[in-house]
Image (spheres, helix red, strand yellow):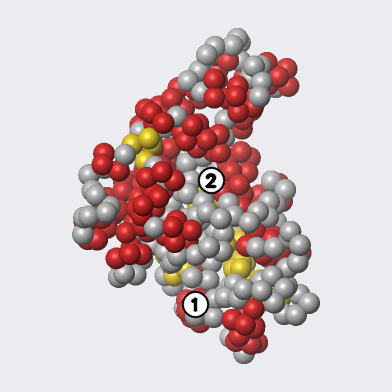
């Protein structure tokens, strides 16, 4: 394959007047310069964010030192109406415009306006994807900076530790769905995006479903290629927000008290049950056997015949196993863990106490999880063919 040579940076903007100058300055500082910045300034028709968005549009009109493409879904008559609205639709419009402007060898870097990154970020992305030209996507490592405000940093650290604990356990069982989906931390080539049929423009979670599509049809990279520093990350703000129904912003806004219920740490036994189910796929090609997830899947899929339809449609063991893996996907895994109370670990089972321990203690715990996650990401990359 010819190497990737150009990057399209895609950023949805909603009421980001405060963050936009920093985003532009970070892009001006990039050591790799062959990129175009695509922005979708969006809000409901003269709804929330309208005034700030008009300021953003005015600011962008003054930019002459960066290649810009601005999609205006904010000005009067251009805002969202009806059901087609929100960040999912903004990303969809951005990706569609990039597809119209470029061929399949274009790299797309999905960012958010509140995300910080180093001057060599785009260069590292290009290096990584050229080192793995057959990969469908790159789930970029992330790290939330702390605000210095206790009431915000506690739920942020609790939520990030939940995400890292979950990913670590998926990595330990070599799940194909071992990724953390953040819209500010996704990279993909256009050929892979076209192959999966594009993004589903949801109000929230569109990043998860897009990465899941990439996982079902190809390989997702999880760490930067050597010799990039192992701690290179994107750094999205952990600000409270109600712009989307779930994710970091709503979790921080909801506060610490709901975390144990809404975002529990799951026991290793739950992930072991998922692995045992995956390990049973070769045997299921020949005959039905009960797996740890069978009862859940029968209820979830409203059928007692889980595997015979797949045997009829997929006539080789390899294709059958792939079909099983698509059926028991990342969403099903999370639903299965949520459905079994025995798999939930109370916060008291963790080595820190999020309500009472000092922030530096909680941050140190976050950093231990980060180090473990990065080590496992690297091992997965080392075990995968380039």
Q: Nearer the viewer, residue 129 or 209?
A: 209
Task: Please give left or right for residue 129 compared with residue 203 in the image.
Answer: left
Rendered image: mark on residue 220: 2
Q: CB of mark 1 within 8 Å of CB of mark 2?
A: no
Q: Position of residue 317 (x, y in %)?
A: 62, 19
Residue 226, given in percent of the width and then of the height, sits at 40, 54
Q: Residues within 10 Å of mark 2 (few under 14, many from 20)?
A: many
In-front residue for pair 67/149: 149
Kindly give the residue lying farthest to the right in the view shown: 77
| Residue drawn at point x = 68 percent, y = 51 percent | 200
Residue 362: image quadrant is: bottom left
Instruction: Give the label on residue 377, or none.
Output: none
Residue 157 vs 79, above or below: the answer is above
Instruction: Identify the residue position indicated by label 1 in the image.
Output: 19
User: SS at mark 1?
Assistant: loop
Q: Nearer the viewer, residue 375 or 297?
A: 297
The one nearer the camera, 80 or 321, is 80
Of marks 1 and 2, the one in the foreground: 1
């Amino acid at each position: 394959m010819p190497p990737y040579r150009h990057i399209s940076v895609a950023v949805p903007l909603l009421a980001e007047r405060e963050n936009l100058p920093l985003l532009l300055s970070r892009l001006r500082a990039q050591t790799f310069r062959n990129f175009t910045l695509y922005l979708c300034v969006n809000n409901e028709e003269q709804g929330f964010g309208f005034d700030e968005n008009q300021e953003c549009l005015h600011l962008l009109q003054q930019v002459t030192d960066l290649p810009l493409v601005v999609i205006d879904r904010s000005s009067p008559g251009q805002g969202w109406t009806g059901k087609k609205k929100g960040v999912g639709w903004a990303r969809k419009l951005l990706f569609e415009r990039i597809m119209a402007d470029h061929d399949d060898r274009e790299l797309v870097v999905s960012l958010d306006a509140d995300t910080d990154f180093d001057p060599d970020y785009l260069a590292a992305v290009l290096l990584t994807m050229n080192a793995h030209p057959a990969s469908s996507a790159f789930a970029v490592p992330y790290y939330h900076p702390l605000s210095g405000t206790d009431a915000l940093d506690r739920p942020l650290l609790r939520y990030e530790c939940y995400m890292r604990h979950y990913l670590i356990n998926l990595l330990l069982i070599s799940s194909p769905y071992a990724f953390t989906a953040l819209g500010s931390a996704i990279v993909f080539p256009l050929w892979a995006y076209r192959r999966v049929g594009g993004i589903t423009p949801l109000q929230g979670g569109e990043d998860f479903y897009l990465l899941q599509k990439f996982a079902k049809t190809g390989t997702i990279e999880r760490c930067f290629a050597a010799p990039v520093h192992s701690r290179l990350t994107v750094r999205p703000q952990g600000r409270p927000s109600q712009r989307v129904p779930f994710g970091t912003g709503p979790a921080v806004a909801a506060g610490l008290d709901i975390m144990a219920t809404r975002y529990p740490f799951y026991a290793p036994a739950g992930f072991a049950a998922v692995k045992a189910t995956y390990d049973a796929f070769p045997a299921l090609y020949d005959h039905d056997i009960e797996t740890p997830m069978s009862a859940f899947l029968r209820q979830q899929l409203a059928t007692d015949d889980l595997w015979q339809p797949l045997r009829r449609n997929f006539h080789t063991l390899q294709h059958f196993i792939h079909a099983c893996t698509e059926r028991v996907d990342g969403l099903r895994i999370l639903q299965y863990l949520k459905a079994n109370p025995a798999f939930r670990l109370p916060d008291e089972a963790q080595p820190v106490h999020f309500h009472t321990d000092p922030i530096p203690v909680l941050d140190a715990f976050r950093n231990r999880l980060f180090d473990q996650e990065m080590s496992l990401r690297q091992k997965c990359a080392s075990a995968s063919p380039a």
